[in-house]
Amino acid sequence: METNEPLLAEEIPVGHAPILAAITPDGRHVYVTDFGSSSVSVIDTTTRSVITTIDVPSGPWGIAVAPDGLRAYVACFGTNTVAVIDTTTNHITASIPGLNKPLDLTVSPDGSRLYVASQGGNRVDVISTATDTVVASVPVGTGPRNVAITPDGTEVYVTEEGANAVDVIDTATHTVIATLTGFLFPRGVAVSPDGQRVYVTEYGGNELDIIDTATHTVVDSVTGLPIPFGVAVSHDGLLAYVARDGDDSVSVIDLIRNEITDTVPGFHAPSWLVVTPDDLDVYVVNNGNETVRVLPAPSGAYPDVGPMTGGTTVDIIGEGLGNATAVRFGCRPAASFTVLNDHEILAVSPRLATDVKIDATIGQHTTRTVGRFYYLPDSVLTKISPTSGPLSGGGTLTVTGRGLITTTAVRFGTVAVTPSSVLDDQVTVTVPPAESAGPVPVTVVTRSNSYGRATFTYVGSPVITSVTPSLGSTAGGDPVLIVGTELASTQSVRIGGVAADFGVISNTRIAAVTPPAAAPGPANVTVTTTGGTATASGAFVYI
C-alpha cells in the first residue's frame, strides 16, 4: 500500500455532526445531512460553498437524490419519517410517516420507489414516490444499516450490523432472495455501474468485500482498511473510494486489480463520500470537524492495461492538460485523443508490444509523463467442458485456452461470473442459473483482447412420455423407443436399474436395447441427462 502526502483539497464547513451526502445527477449540488443540527447543507460544487441550509425533522441521517434531480429524500431518524425536498426551491414539500428509526435510503433507477432501512423495525420499507406513502415492508435481519440498488432496479442490497449479514431483496416480489453471512459489522454498500459487483465495507473486519451479483457470493476482499465506513464507486467503474474512520484517511482502490493504489491522510472521522459525475472530484463528509473536504481524483491512466493490438480507451487524469497537443504511448502517438478539460484526456492506445510511459505534450514544447500503460498478450479461448448443464446451474465449468491469467470474469450470455481458479491455460467457474433452456455464448473477460467463443447449452429437466414396445423377454436384447422431451444430452439409460445400450435420435427420442433381467415383472426406465433425471415407473415389463 502506498501512502502519499495530502492532495490539494478544500474543506467546506457544514452543520453539526454531518453523516451522509448525495449529489445531484448534473453534479452541481451536494446535499449533506447534519444529524446534530437537524438540517441539510446544500453545497454548490462550482463555488465549493454552502449556498443554503434546510431545516428538516429531527435526526437526519440518510439522503438520496431522485434520478431526475428534482427531489431529495431525507431519512429522519428522530421522527420516523422521510422528508421530501424540492431541489429547485430547497424547501420541504412532504413528510412521509410510517418508518421505524430510518437510517439510509435509496431511489430506484426510474424514480418510482424509495427503499428505506428501518433499523428499529428490522425491515426495509418501500415507498411510492407518486403517493409519498409506504406501500410494502420487507422483513430483514437485525440492524439494517445501509442500502443500495442495482442499476436495473431488480435487487436491493442491505447491510445488517446486528446480523453480520447482507440481505438481497427482489424488488419485483418484495422478498429476501439471498442472505450472505460471515461479515463483521457491515456498513457501507455500493453497486458497480454495470451491476455486476456490490462493494461492502466491514466496519469491524477492516476490509472491503466484493460480491458477485450473479451468484450472490463474496468473490474477493481488499484488506488493510482500518474501520472503513462509506464506500463510493466512480461512474466508469474503475475506482472505489473508502472512508477510513480508523486512521482519518481515504483509500483509493483499483477495481480492476482490487488493490489499494493510494491512501490520502488528513481527514477527520470521514464517514461518507460521493463522486462527481465526471469522476474528477470526491466530496468526503468529515464527521469529526463538521466539514466536507473536496478530494481530486488521483492522477494517472485508467485503465492502465490493454492488448498489444491497441484500441483501449484510456482516461488520463491530471493537472494542466487543457493545452495538450499530443499524447504518446512510449514512442508511438496515441491512435486518437480528445482533450475534455484541463484535468482529463481520453486517448486510444496504439498497437504496441511492451510496457510504456504515457507522455502528453503541453503546448508546443513541454512534455511530461502522465501515467503508465501495460500491454498484455491476447487471450484465446479454445474450448469449454462441459458444454451443457441444468437450468439450476451450479456445476463447475472449465475454460481452456492461453493468455487467460488476467481473466476477471466468464460471461454466460449477459451474466458475468467471477472465476474460482485462474491459470494461464485454464480457468474454472461455477455455472450460473438460467431462466430458460437453450444455448448461450460463453466468453472470457480479461485485461487483454479475448478471442474465441464457446457455447453452453442450458438443458431443461428431461421427461419420458412413452416406452415402446412396453413388453420384452427377460433375456434382454429387445429394441425399445423412448419418447419424451429434453433428451438430446442423455448420458445414460437404465432399465430395471441396469445400464442399457442406447443412442440419441433427437431431443425427443432415444433408441435403447433392454438389458437382461433377473425375473419377470415391471421395470423402471430411467434417463439421465445433463439437465437432470427422469424415471418412468414400470414402463417396461419383462415376461
Image (tube, helix red, strand yellow):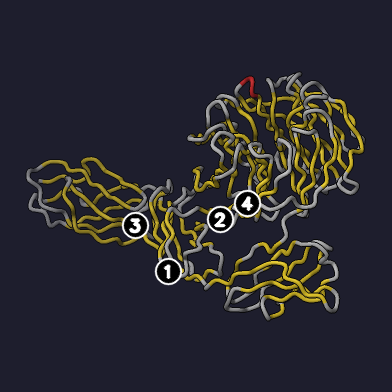
In the rendered image, the vertical position of residue 224 relative to residue 364, given as above or below: above
In the rendered image, the vertical position of residue 108 relative to residue 334, given as above or below: above
Name the residue that disc number 1 marks: 401
Q: Amino acid at mark 4?
A: Ile
Name the residue that disc number 2 marks: 414
Instruction: State yes or no: discs 2 and 4 in contact (Cβ < 8 Å).
Output: no
* Residue under the point 49% across and 43% down: 217
Question: Is residue 10 in view from this perspective?
Answer: yes
Cα separation, mark 3 vs mark 4, equals 45 Å
Name the residue that disc number 3 marks: 489
Where is residue 533? Give x, y as percent: 31, 46
Cα separation, mark 2 vs mark 3, equals 24 Å
* Residue under the point 74% across and 50% down: 6
Q: Amino acid at mark 1?
A: Gly
Q: Residues within 10 Å of mark 2 (few under 14, many from 20)?
A: few
Where is residue 437? Give x, y as percent: 45, 52
